[in-house]
Amino acid sequence: MNSFVPAMTDQEPKTRIKRSATAQEYGLKTLILVCCGLLWLCAHTQPVDAEDDCLPPLVLPPVESFSATTSENSLFSPFLTHCDQSDWCWTFLPQGFLYTTYWASSAEPRLSVKLIEEKTMGSLLDSSIAGRVGFVRFGSRNRLEGWQFDLLAGVNLRQDPESHLDMQATDYRYDLPLTYRNGPHAFKLGFYHVSSHRGDEYLVTNQTLERYNFLRDVFNFGYSYYPVPELRLYGEIGYGFNVDVSEPLEFQFGFDYGPAQATRIYGAPFAALNVHLREELNYGGNVAVQLGWAWRGFSKASGILRSGLYYYDGGSSQFSFYDQHESQIGWGLWYDF
């Protein structure tokens, strides 16, 4: 990989730091204003009737009212209130998520492990460790409907199984999405940060390589449509207001097809496609395809467990090698939130 790193004067680092700080401050103020406006809007929004919802309500155990166990003077009493299936209310730490991760996306945080054979690099082991929590929801407690604010964070790791599992690269990412769902429509307006780092062992082995400081602070907007409960069509645009190495704009789109209800032990087939286009690759990018079997639990908070074949072609799924073309095929095990 050839790269050119221009010489930098003593003044340039200070200028870059100042511009970065100004961009972060402006971006944070913008995010706060947008979130406040959307929260005001959700307080004046009425849900559609249950008959208009194409997604069937989840089967859940009965939910007891918090009023019997929570003092009126409790700090969270405005949030921990009982609401029936037809009403919207505030819920602190809600169950389930209104806008889920894209199954075939290689960049979003999830729990996963992939055994890969890459055309030029040979065998690779890619894995992810992640978690997600819903902070607050204004909407239905018994159905996936309303407004919700979440935190999603994870680490995407690449190891070389032929060199004692030496770490080659790691991507760190966290998301703060504000999501909305009503009937077959779901929206996401959020912020995410990602930074990429090459592994120490890899840098020792390849001492002639330059280190890329791949960094993105991004506002993104996504839309998903469910023509039937089992099929999701989606598209997303992201703009990086603070970037290094990468460029601001990115686009992605695709579909997820799989079980929408609990599957028991038998599972059901699934298929997923994701196309991710990035400005730093001249609006090229990558395409990822997954095909296999999936399982979904009975709990409203259950994600979806999937296992099957995996194909990827395009710019590397590790941002440390963003400008390297990779053609991957392998097997994966994924758990998405």
Image: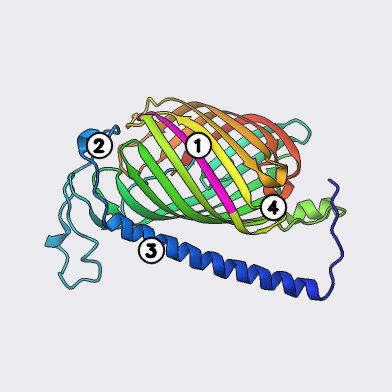
The reply to whether the magenta stretch includes residue 63 is no
Mark closest to the chain's N terminus, 4 or 1: 1
Dot 2 falls on a residue whose secondary structure is: loop
Q: Which mark is residue 246?
A: 4
Q: Mark 2: few, some, or many residues within 10 Å (few <14, many ≥20)?
A: some
Question: Above or below — where is 119 with respect to 324?
Answer: above
Between residues 51 and 231, which one lies in front from this camera angle?
51
Q: Which residue is mark 3?
A: 36
Q: Amino acid at mark 2?
A: Pro
Q: Quadrant of the N terminus?
A: top right
Q: Amino acid at mark 4?
A: Ser
On the question of residue 60 being in view, the answer is yes
Q: Mark 1: few, some, or many residues within 10 Å (few <14, many ≥20)?
A: many
Q: Which residue is mark 1?
A: 103
Residue at screen point 79% across, 71% down = 12
Nearest to the eye among marks 4 and 1: give it: 4
Q: Which residues are magenta?
A: 228-239
